[in-house]
Amino acid sequence: MNAPVTTAGLLIVGGGPAAHHAAIAYREHGGPGPVLLVSDDDTPPYFRPPLSKELLRGGTDGPDLLLPGRTGAEVRTGRRVESLSVADRLARLDDGGTVAFRQCLLATGSAAAALPVPGADTALYLRTLADARTLDERIGYAGSAIVVGSGFIGCEAAASLARRGLRVTVCSDERVPQAARLGDAVGDRLAGWLAEEGVTLRGGAEVTGIGTTASGRVVQLRDAEPELADVVLVAAGATPRAGLAADAGIAVRSGRVVVDERMRSSAPGVFAAGDVALAYNAAAGRHLAVEHWGEAEAMGTVAGTTAAGGDARWDSPPGFWTVIGDRTLKYTAWGDGFDEVALESHDGGGFTAWYRSGGVVCGVATHLADGDHERGTELVRRGATSTGRPDGR
Ligand SMILES: Cc1cc2nc3c(=O)[nH]c(=O)nc-3n(C[C@H](O)[C@H](O)[C@H](O)COP(=O)(O)OP(=O)(O)OC[C@H]3O[C@@H](n4cnc5c(N)ncnc54)[C@H](O)[C@@H]3O)c2cc1C
């Protein structure tokens, strides 16, 4: 029997925010033909940010997590697109089915980065709802946890696990969380937040292996005593899933699909958006790699609008928020480096960090300073040289 062939005006590969918002925008702009969304996740598009926050603390799960809004798309979950032929406009699925598409959006996102040490495959990771549920189940029997990595997801998860009553240690090769991305001064604040949540931070600790002893899990550290716990979660960043595009001969740089400000890839009629894209930002005047929820939504909207024949481009400064315990850090930045940071403290523990590159404001991170967050976002967008502070910093 011949494998089934489906026809789609727009084939969307992926089931994250970029995919979901592209489908909505395509419909809203009158894109022709049926939209087919194929995701290898078991669940239709859902909110990922709560996985390390509310869900891990024992809160939100189920229908609350599903993304709202009507896409009008046929959604196929638990199905992977295995290969694409750009010339023939055909996609092959892992069930042997084929999709004949007019246009295609690659919104394949990222996978949790594997830690390149022995035993890393025995640890838990946190990218999908299924990962979060597995972790939730394991901590039900655990008294202690080690989180490897002090990125946003590592810090959020550590604080959430501590709130569940676990003894939590974060092992990170950075001295303080996020030092490379946000600088030492903000990193010190984040370290303080973790300490107040009861989390022990072992900074400057390079993990060399993960194993099991008679009393539980063990994390080996270079030139230091190992850490022992019941559960090990690796939160070592994300790896964009650009293999499908690369295999199809679509231009990929730094592991991401290169697209213009309208999310058009090197292959006519093929778009990419979200974490997997290295997209040109019209306001920045350069390509940016971002792994933020809001940007995936924005890029997906641009891709869906463009595919439908509408006019849209990506020109907003990327923004991110993180919640550690009860504290929220808001961050807007082009995200490709800074050479100067000035930290301003506010009453009640709030602060604003201003980032500059070549004298131009390129980022702002705030806690309890929403006015600065909004003003800073605009200064970043404009490429301002002054923050307007009296001392000129
Ligand atoms: C635990 C956690 C917490 C986070 N918290 C925040 C936060 O607070 N703020 C923030 O800004 N960002 C946060 N992020 C990051 C944010 O979730 C991502 O930037 C965002 O999800 C990227 O969206 P996307 O649509 O590009 O890809 P993804 O959300 O990664 O979705 C990709 C989809 O593609 C599917 N897929 C991949 N390859 C194939 C294939 N070949 N065939 C079929 N389907 C495929 C996957 O199954 C998945 O459905 C968090 C991420 C995690 C994991």
Image: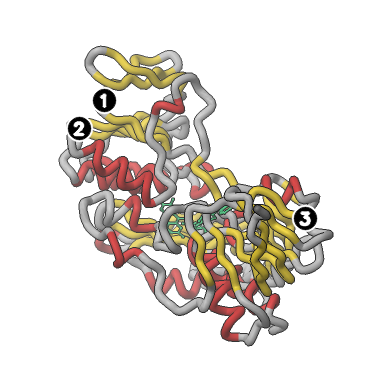
* Residue type for callout 3: Ser
Please tell me which of labels 1 and 3 falls first in the chain. Answer: 3
Image location of residue 332, percent across then percent down:
51, 63
Kind of residue at badge 1: Ala
**Closer-to-camera residue (308/113):** 308
Residue at left 47%, top 61%?
320
Q: State whether residue 181 is above or below residue 122.
A: below
Q: Position of residue 44 (x, y in %)?
A: 43, 62
Residue 85: mark in rendering: 3
Q: Position of residue 160 (x, y in %)?
A: 26, 47
SS for dot 3 = strand
Contact check, label 2 and label 1, Cβ < 8 Å? yes
Q: Is residue 198 left or right of residue 283?
A: left
- Which residue shows up at 64% across the image and 66% down it? 6
**What scheme was used to colour the molecule?**
secondary structure
Q: Name the residue under label 1.
A: 229
Asked if residue 314 shows in the view, the reply is: no
Q: Residue at x 39, y 18 (%)?
A: 220
